Amino acid sequence: MLWSRDVGDLRSDSGLLRRGDDLYLLGPSSLTCVEARSNTVRWVYSEEQLQGLDRYRDTVYVLQDDLFEPELRALNATTGREMWTSPHPRLNPKRRTTAPTGLDADRDALEGNQGQLLLAGDVLCLLTYAPYDTMWARRSSWGRHWRAYGFDARTREALWFHEGAAAGVIGVDQAGGRIAVAVSENPGSPGTDDYARRDPLVVLRAADGKVERTVRNGARYPRAHPGAKGTACYADRTAIRAVDLATGRVRWTRRAESATAVTPLPTRGMLLAATSEGLSGYAAASGGAPRWTRTDVGELTAADGSLLTAGGLVFVPGPEPGTEGEPGWGLHALDVRTGRTVWAARSDSVASVEAASAAPDVVHLYADGTVVAIAPPERRP
């Protein structure tokens, strides 16, 4: 282990983010930037209700929750100093409305109280929406529409505005100069055969926010849209599917009991899936032919829910090498092509990981209020 740091509460969905040499620790009321390998604190930004972040060149963009509508903050990546706050959505210069806002607004004019930020090249997109995923959420959504606001990530100039239908956002992707937004007004339960089966995928041009295409029944596969290339893997309770991203067609299907996590894109020609039977590797270009299975290891996932991978390795909790013990002994780095353990390191944190981030030089795990950094044995100082 390189180092450990007591950090208190971090967000389980976006608490760890690695960008270059920096590791960002996102808590509900602070964002801390540390040097990923040395644990040196670069800066701390304190603000309430922080939800997500990403970095563009020398700027860190942070999403802040609000009672009525989300906001974006721009921080200097070197100092953490706040440089910009996005205008309230109703005051965005690209959005022209004379309707009342706030508590006096018509129901369909209200802004969604949830948000996501997405970087698509030089465009920063803020998505706002209300949840529609449960009966209670639909009743309290008040017919709020999802909306997208485009900004120049370099200058933070407002570029465009798009208003969608009364629906929640259940998935997003960007590729080939497009922003794809999967929306639904009643998606159902994730992982089931009927989840978002009849819901659309709205594809916006990143440059101007215009709708290029609406893919009917495309919400289940948000990575499959114009501008995207290659293959992506999706899972439900009974199978994993490889989807052609250019056409949206399913290339192959493999039955898998209770698949819980996958690698969304091929890694060195392999797609991986964690199921009730263990962790397995499938050849992406050979009809999903099974190549290996490990029944003695568990799974770790990144912020987007995908299996934790970097540099041709997948990182999992496993037993002490050479034994048949419990997988809580420590961290294993497996070769994605063979499933064999390349290196392993003792760590109690793997038994209760809440967030994780991986790069070829170091893996960061967050568990029980502590972040630990684990490096391959040959790279330890």
Image (cartoon, helix red, strand yellow):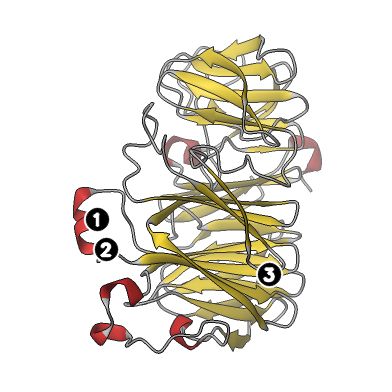
Q: Which residue is mark 2?
A: 141
Kind of residue at disc 3: Asp
Q: Is residue 150 visible?
A: yes
Please report the residue visible at 80 percent of the width from the left and 37 percent of the height from the top. Answer: 378
Query: Spatial distance from mark 3 to mark 1, Cα to Cα?
Result: 30 Å
Nearest to viewer (mark 2 / mark 3):
3
Q: Is residue 35 above or below residue 311?
A: below
Query: Mark 1 and mark 3 in contact (Cβ < 8 Å)?
Result: no
Query: Spatial distance from mark 2 to mark 3, Cα to Cα?
Result: 28 Å
Element carrying mark 3: loop
Assess disc 1: are there few (<14), some (14-19) or many (≥20) residues with their C-alpha within 10 Å of its C-alpha.
some
Query: Mark 3 and mark 2 in contact (Cβ < 8 Å)?
Result: no
Q: Would residue 107 be found to the left or right of residue 183 on screen?
A: left
Q: Would residue 277 be found to the left or right of residue 343 on screen?
A: left
Please report the residue visible at 61 percent of the width from the left and 87 percent of the height from the top. Answer: 84
Nearest to viewer (mark 3 / mark 1):
3
Please report the residue visible at 67 percent of the width from the left and 10 percent of the height from the top. Answer: 289
Query: Mark 2 and mark 1 in contact (Cβ < 8 Å)?
Result: yes
Q: Earlier in the sequence, mark 2 or mark 3?
A: 2
Whole-percent x, y for residue 345 in the image: 63, 33
Q: Is residue 40 visible?
A: no
Q: Is residue 361 above or below residue 341?
A: below
Q: How many marks?
A: 3
Q: Which mark is residue 227?
A: none
Q: Which residue is mark 1?
A: 138
Q: Which residue is mark 3?
A: 208
Whole-percent x, y for residue 186 in the image: 31, 46
Element carrying mark 1: helix
Q: Is residue 337 above or below residue 165?
A: above
